[in-house]
């Protein structure tokens, strides 16, 4: 008989083994499992479910509801996430996935949740949504259990071995400079300007990323900015937000100055800087729509595509 229980530490290595056999594009080791699952601020053992059949682990569901406020989003009390869901391939199509989802939905509803998203829990997500190539069976599954398909997200990457600054870049930079714009690595004298620029125009998450880089004494090496003729910051990009040298983002230009090529120049300067540091690879996990089209024009290509799922108005 299949039974659903809350997280039990005795099954830790079985969970990691099941994860690596099933989520083959997102394999983990015990260190990452502990850091990103068990030691996450919002981990609650009664929202982390295991499905057991004859003492054998056959399913795992990581549910998340915030117990700590997240920046300016706060506790988001009516939201929750199914961050991970796995059923052992030998036990799939027997209703175990459905039973795990039903159980977590009841537990979420008891805690006041009205809206559940799949995978996209910030800041601790493993992937933005359901990978359409690696986990395509799950697309049908989430539709079947009542989740709405909200659209697409992509992860992108490019090699920097072949990156060069083109004539077009130099022309555009010259034109922007004639209009009074300048582009440079961040320096600490601009710390408060940058924090204010990010907080006002892009919200707490971006501000936090820049602050973390400043705290860790990394900001001067990892952030580029654009300023206007009045010495005001109007554009920003960074890398290494999670400690990984090659991870790019966030990246943004003041909305009133978009489509003037400032983003183009900043991004090219960042790639050039990375190459000079012998960082020959750039990637990021989550973009879509206009962002994706921008990066495609800069030789960055999609390496994974996801569908985003949500269930609303629970309870
Ligand atoms: C998604 C997953 C958890 C579903 O678990 P499950 O126990 O097999 O699901 P259920 O038996 O409850 O299936 C319910 C319905 O989902 C759909 N479904 C599940 N697997 C499917 C498949 N391989 N192909 C088509 N539809 C499928 C069907 O509509 C199914 O109903 P049916 O069996 O009556 O036709 C499982 O496929 C899995 O572990 N996949 C790999 C991990 C993963 O991709 N996780 C999602 C990312 S978080």
Image (cartoon, rainbow, N blue to C red):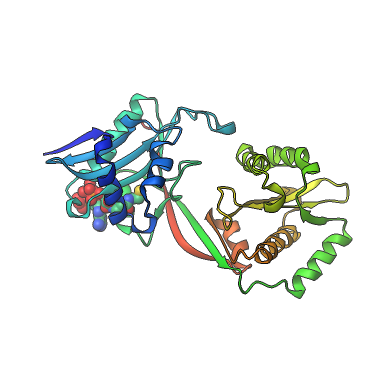
Identify the residue shown where x is 43% and y is 56%.
306
Work out whether residue 42 or residue 243 is closer to the camera in this orientation and state it: 243
| Residue drawn at 76 percent across, 59 percent down | 260
Q: Is residue 203 left or right of residue 119?
A: right
Residue closer to the observer: 291 or 68: 68
Q: Quadrant of residue 65?
A: top left
The location of residue 307, given as percent across then percent down, is 42, 53
Residue 257: x and y in percent read 76, 52
Q: Quadrant of residue 10?
A: top left
The answer to which of 30 and 264 lies nearer the viewer is 30
Work out which quarter of the rendered image holds the N terminus and state it.
top left
Specify whether residue 120 is in view: yes
Q: Position of residue 106 (x, y in %)?
A: 29, 30
Residue 138 shows up from this direction: no
Q: Is residue 127 left or right of residue 14?
A: right
Residue 201 pos. (x, y %): 70, 41
Labels in figure, total: 0
At 65% from the left and 66% from the top, the residue drawn is: 275
Q: Is residue 73 left or right of residue 275?
A: left
For image coordinates 54% across by 29% down, the residue present is 74
Nearest to the observer: residue 141 or residue 25: 25
Drawn side of residue 156 relative to residue 25, left or right: right
- Give the vertical position of 260 relative to 204 (above or below): below
Q: Is residue 68 above or below residue 177?
A: above
Quarter of the image that includes the C terminus? top left
């Amino acid at each position: 008989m299949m039974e659903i229980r809350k997280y039990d530490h005795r099954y830790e290595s079985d969970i990691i083994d099941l994860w690596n056999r099933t989520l083959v594009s997102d394999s983990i080791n015990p260190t990452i499992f502990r850091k990103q699952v068990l030691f996450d601020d919002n981990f609650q053992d009664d929202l982390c479910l295991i499905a057991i059949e004859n003492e054998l682990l056959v399913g795992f569901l990581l549910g998340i509801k915030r117990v700590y406020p997240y920046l300016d989003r706060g506790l988001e009390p009516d939201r929750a996430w199914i961050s991970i869901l796995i059923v052992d391939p030998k036990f799939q199509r027997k209703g175990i996935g459905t039973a795990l989802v039903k159980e977590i939905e009841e537990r979420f509803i008891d805690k006041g949740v009205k809206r559940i998203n799949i995978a996209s829990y910030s800041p601790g997500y493993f992937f933005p949504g359901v990978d359409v190539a690696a986990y395509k069976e799950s697309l049908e599954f989430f539709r079947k259990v009542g989740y709405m398909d909200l659209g697409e997200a992509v992860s992108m990457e490019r090699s920097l071995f072949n990156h060069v600054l083109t004539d077009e870049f130099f022309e555009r930079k010259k034109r922007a400079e004639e209009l009074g714009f300048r582009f440079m690595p961040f320096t600490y004298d601009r710390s408060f300007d940058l924090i204010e620029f990010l907080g006002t125009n892009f919200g707490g998450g971006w501000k936090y990323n820049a602050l973390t880089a400043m705290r860790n004494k990394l900001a001067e090496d990892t952030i580029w900015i654009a300023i206007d003729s009045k010495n005001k910051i109007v554009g920003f990009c960074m890398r290494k937000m999670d400690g990984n040298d090659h991870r790019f983002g966030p990246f943004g230009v003041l909305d009133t100055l978009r489509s003037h090529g400032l983003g183009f120049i900043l991004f090219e300067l960042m790639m050039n800087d990375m190459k000079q540091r012998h960082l020959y690879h750039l990637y990021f996990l989550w973009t879509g729509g206009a962002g994706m089209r921008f990066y495609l024009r800069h030789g960055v290509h999609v390496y994974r595509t996801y569908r985003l799922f949500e269930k609303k108005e629970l309870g």
